[in-house]
Image (cartoon, rainbow, N blue to C red):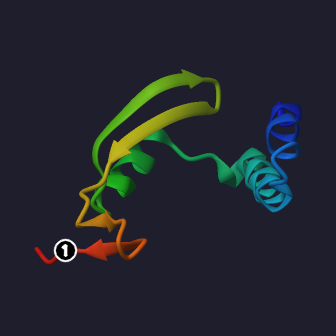
Amino acid sequence: MLERFFNAFVPLGKVELLREWVLHNVADQAPDGVMREGEALQEKEGINFEDLKVHFRHGLEAVVSRKKPVRGAWCRDKMAWVHRSK
């Protein structure tokens, strides 16, 4: 499985991202590193993630998407993210 990440990140020169992903993956394999779906989704909802969906699940792997409210916009003139007030 890790071979896919090497094949994707190394050609892009993203070695530090690859390192972080490998460390994350190794930590996930530890007995206490397994996140239970219900608890994980509940935790994400508690930090303003909306409309969480599990699109794929196979063994310990899952693909989850979410929406998070955007309170700003990209300003091309300033080439920066401009935050809007509520």
Place residue 82 in its image quadrant: bottom left
Q: What quarter of the picture does the C terminus occupy?
A: bottom left
Identify the residue at horizontal 44%, vertical 49% (top origin). Answer: 40
Q: What's the amino acid at mark 1?
A: Arg
Give the camera-side residue of 25 and 12: 12
Pick the quarter of the image with the N terminus.
Answer: top right
User: Residue sitting at 81 percent across and 39 percent down?
Assistant: 5
Report which residue position mark 1 lands on. 84
Q: Secondary structure at mark 1?
A: loop
Q: Indicate left or right for 83 with 3 as reference.
A: left
Q: Pinpoint residue 58: horizontal percent, then vertical percent.
A: 61, 21
Rendered position, 47 above or below 82:
above
Q: Is residue 45 left or right of residue 37?
A: left
Using residue 41 as the reference point, say whether residue 4 is left or right of it: right
**On screen, 66 above or below 84?**
above
Q: Total number of numbered labels?
A: 1
Looking at the image, residue 48 lies above or below residue 35 = below
- Identify the residue shown where x is 30% and y is 54%: 68
Which image quadrant is residue 79 in?
A: bottom left
Label 1 neighbourhood size at 10 Å, few (<14), some (14-19), many (20+)?
few
Q: Residue at x 80, y 57 (%)?
A: 23
Residue 28: image location, x then y, percent = 71, 48
Q: Position of residue 3 (x, y in %)?
A: 89, 33
Residue 37 lies, with reference to residue 56, above or below; the image says below
* Picture quadrant where residue 38 is located: top left
Query: Looking at this rendering, what residue extends furthest in the front direction?
Result: 77
Residue 22 image offset from top left, x and y in percent = 82, 51
Of residue 18 and residue 46, the one placed in the foreground of this image is 18
Q: Closer to the camera, 56 or 77? A: 77
